[in-house]
Image (cartoon, coloured by chain):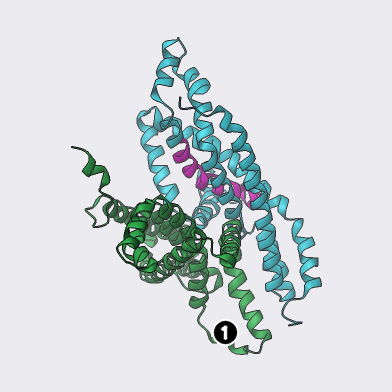
Amino acid sequence: MGTYFSLEYMLESLPVLLSYMDVTILVTVISEIAAMVLGSAVALMRIHRMPALNGLCIGYISFVRGTPFLVQLYLICFGVPQILGAFGYADIRSLPVLLFVLMVMTLHSGAYIAEIMRGSILSIDEGQLEAACSIGMTAAQAYRRIVLPQAFRTAIPALSNEIISTLKNTSLVFNVGVIDMLSKAELMGSFSYRNLELYLDVGIVYIFLCLAIHAGTVFLEHGRGRHKNQAAMVTVE
Amino acid sequence: MGNVIDFSFALEVFGKLIGYVPVTLGLALSSMFFASVLGLAVMFVRWRRIPVLGQLATFYVIIGRALPTLIVLYLVFFGLPLLLLILSGGKVNNGFNQISPLVFAVLGLTLHSGAYLAEIFRTAVQSVNKGQMEAALSVGMTSWESFRRIVLPQAAVLALPLMSNQFLGLIKGTSIAFMITVMELFGAANVISSLNNRYLEVYIATAILYWLVSICFEKAFQMLEAKMSFFKERKI
């Protein structure tokens, strides 16, 4: 077995791969925060049926959910430079690829989060919004202070699924030239011809990242939060 | 604007790419079939709490859901030949290099979706009223019979929306198979775009094709769900 699979090599390359984990985490965190803002905005547009925007949002969500992430990634990373190139911005390659990747990830994740947030905002009792407005808050204030915090709380399990799937999608970004764990594994594999060990390493890191996110969600969900819906506890005498 | 999008080229590409839709669908359908079988088996093993297999199944579900599809595919694509090599005692020409990458792709996608489907089936079976199983046992069915005849059909209705979601995800997941040299829709798009050095048209055509396929299946599943809702437990 020794010549086919080297445990030693697997162990000694793990720290090297771990040092590239920051790209994965950076991309996940930034794009997820941006996607939550985008998703909430899109959800609100759809709930209030804003004239032209509603149709636009439906199209956007349907497109993102109907096409693979890879296609979207390639479409933006290779298509947008072609458009810009035609308009005379020739030095498009000087822009960092990471910027495009973040854009795609935000747009991709935003559509899924919009659907999640729409469901959870609708699940918040309408009386909450009315009560907030009746004491003189503007609609924006009412949403920001009263409705959205509760909606986010309800959406935690679904959002954590979405964050995990974004994390897993980051394994695809090396296709467009961002050096992350997997592309480092690929580079190292082309020197040592020991791809399996390296991919196992990356797999293990991903498993731990996923478990960490999962643990974080369980903590958030069951922890004592300010915005927990306490109706159920109050009614029981 | 003229040289941004070349419409005649886009149409030509569209025609070429349609030929690869069956490959994508074949990949998705066969993986879905095998993954359903796998998921059902894993769910059953966990449900009956079979000693060693049960723990293994739980482990598989956790790992399978935590790994990105690409890594599962890579592990299968690079790991399986190695395993075969070891099992065949180190003979280099044991024929594994003649195995089509399609087989590895189906295997990898099956392993990936199987874990998700096992969870979907588990929640579906758990949400069937316990009394149903007890009633079936009390009229003299064996536990396998009552599972197959009573619990499973009801669970299937509950699992259908989630399964359709999983299948739509799988259609999109097949695009990753190009990484292990399978020529499906996305792989073909890559080849065409780099041959012609035009990316925008090709990827727009690819996106539209995936979109159409997804919408068709979504509508089909909605119709199926409407039909199946007849079998749903009604609250009286």
Residue A16: quarter of image: bottom left
Please tell me whether residue A191 is drawn above or below residue B156 in the rendered image.
below
One can see residue B95 in this view: no
Where is residue A166 drawn, in percent x and y?
A: 45, 61
Left of A92 or right of it: where is B121?
left
Q: Which residue carries the number 1 mark? A: A93
**Which chain is cyan in the picture?**
B
What type is the residue that disc 1 sits on? Arg
Query: Residue shown at 39%/66% (left/top)?
Result: A139
Across and down, in percent, residue B30 comes to 63, 42
Residue at the spot 66% in from the left edge and 57% down from the top edge: B210
Q: Main secondary structure of the magenta part?
A: helix
Does the magenta portion include A223?
no
Q: Is residue B14 above or below residue B7?
A: above
Q: Position of residue B217 (x, y in %)?
A: 65, 47
> Is residue B138 shown to the viewer in this render?
yes
Residue farthest along the left direction in this orientation: A237
Span colored in magenta: B96-121
Above or below for A126 versus B164: below
Q: Name the tint of chain A in the rendering.
A: green
Q: 10 Å neighbourhood of mark 1: few (<14), some, or many (≥20)?
A: few
Q: Which chain is mark 1 on? A: A
- Residue A33 drawn at (x, y percent): 40, 68
Residue B139 found in image quarter: top left
Point 62% across, 59% down: residue? B178
In front of the other: B166 or B81: B166
Asked if residue B110 lies in the magenta stretch, the reply is yes
Comparing A218 with B224, the one in front is B224
Q: Is residue A131 left or right of residue B211?
A: left
Secondary structure under the numbered disc 1 in the rendered image: helix
Depth check, front residue: A199 or A222: A222
